[in-house]
Amino acid sequence: MALAREVALPGGTRIFEEGEKADRFWIIRSGTVALDIHMPGRGRQVVETIGAGSLLGWSWLCPPRQWHLAAETRDPVHAWEFDAAAVLDLCAEDTALGLSLVTAVAETIGDRLRATRTRLLDLYGPPGPQGSGAAP
Amino acid sequence: MTPAPLSYRVVDRRDETHDTVTLVLEPGGDALDPFVPGQFAMLYAFGVGEIPVSVSRLGDGHRLTHTIRAVGAVSRALCGLRTGGWVGVRGPFGTAWDTAAAHGNDLLVIAGGIGLAPLRPLVDTVMAEPHAFGRLNVLAGARTPADLLYGDELPAWQEPFGAVTVDRPSNGWTGRVGVVTTLLREARFTPSDTVAFVCGPEVMMRATARALTHQGVRPDRIQVSLERTMRCATGHCGHCQLGPLLLCRDGPVVGYDQAEPLLTIREL
């Protein structure tokens, strides 16, 4: 935690933009952050929101180390902000710590991948050929 | 339980969403025995057919309240009923949410889509005697903001923690986006002293139950509401069989400790 600093971000703060260098990450302590992507003709489309206890940002972990999405606070957010380069340097020095950190980040990535796949199923849509059986 | 349908008249009707309607029914003569949260009735749309529908509110004399989504011929016919229309009703059927098991514990009420309807009487029960329970968390997921049920009631369910999340936000939606399990991280509960009630699409219930057990909630303290094709509702026809269970009789509410191995059985 020595590498972290507390930050307070007002609601509506653009934290990072798609394509920018991913050099930081955050652990959200309170508040909600929306992840969005710009779609031509449709503006910003929110694809997910994340809240307290969640990791914000994992693109810093592997090349090309650019944000794939943008992030904006929905309401006032308090978070721990980490400098990615310093964390990666520390992990290189302490490989056990590095493995723990990568495992934790991978768990987050896995959770979000599973959630995304589940949403692709359109679970709440009407039953039918792609749904949960014959419609009564 | 009455084997033959009794006639009930539609005395109130409310459009919840573009495809979902809540009907309040009043007996035209004899009334069915009282229902408890989690149980269901067989609703017969005259000349069309019969489907199982959970009660979505209790406590108004012999009146029954059902929330129905129009997805097929029978449900469309029921949703099309107007005030003064008639419906045949059998019931009460099935097992109930075990609220006694939740006394003194934190509660997680987790709904997906129209799964919120069978859970609403449970929420009503808990909110009517809050001192009997620990912290109440109501978490609901929906396809879009326009698909959210009971929008005018949800704010009252926010304390100590409640939240809704949608898969596909519309312009202007400022709430959460994502699967309902993402809300668990912020819910306020002590896993070892928590009872969870889950209703929604089966995949959603599996994912939710797994997330809950991962967080330390015991499988026998997770109750899920299972659906299969229910025809007779009396445990005779076998259409709703799931392993050793006939869900119209032994369900729909089943402990996850019993349901978990059954939910991976592939259908024919």
Image: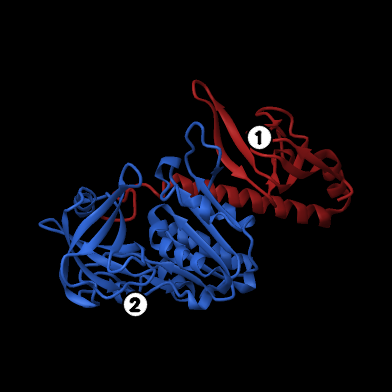
Chain colours: A red, B blue
How far from the left and from the top, in percent, is residue B174? Answer: 56, 38
Quadrant housing residue A47: top right
Q: CA distance from mark 2 to mark 1?
A: 47 Å
Tell me if I can see residue B222 in this picture.
yes
B201 w.r.t. B104: above or below: above
The three-letter code of the residue at mark 1 reads Ala
Up-down relation of residue B238 to residue B60 (above or below): below
The picture places residue B25, in percent across and down from the top left corner, at: 24, 60
- The residue singled out by tag 1 in the image is A71
The quarter holding residue B107 reads bottom right
The residue that appears at 49% across and 31% down in the rendered structure is B171
Q: Nearer the viewer, residue B81 or A41?
A: B81
Disc 2 marks which amino acid? Answer: Asp
In this orientation, which residue lies closer to the viewer: A124 or B22? B22
Residue under the image location 29 percent in, 64 percent down: B64
State the image coordinates of residue B181 (x, y, percent, origin top left). 55, 55
> The C terminus of chain A appears in which quarter of the rendering?
bottom left
Q: Looking at the image, which residue sits at the far top?
A: A41
Q: Which residue is mark 2?
A: B250
Q: Looking at this rendering, what residue extends furthest in the left direction?
A: B47
Is B32 rendered above or below residue B26?
below
Q: Identify the subunit bearing mark 2.
A: B
Q: Quadrant of residue A67?
A: top right
- Residue B201 seen in the figure: no
Residue A11: x and y in percent read: 68, 35
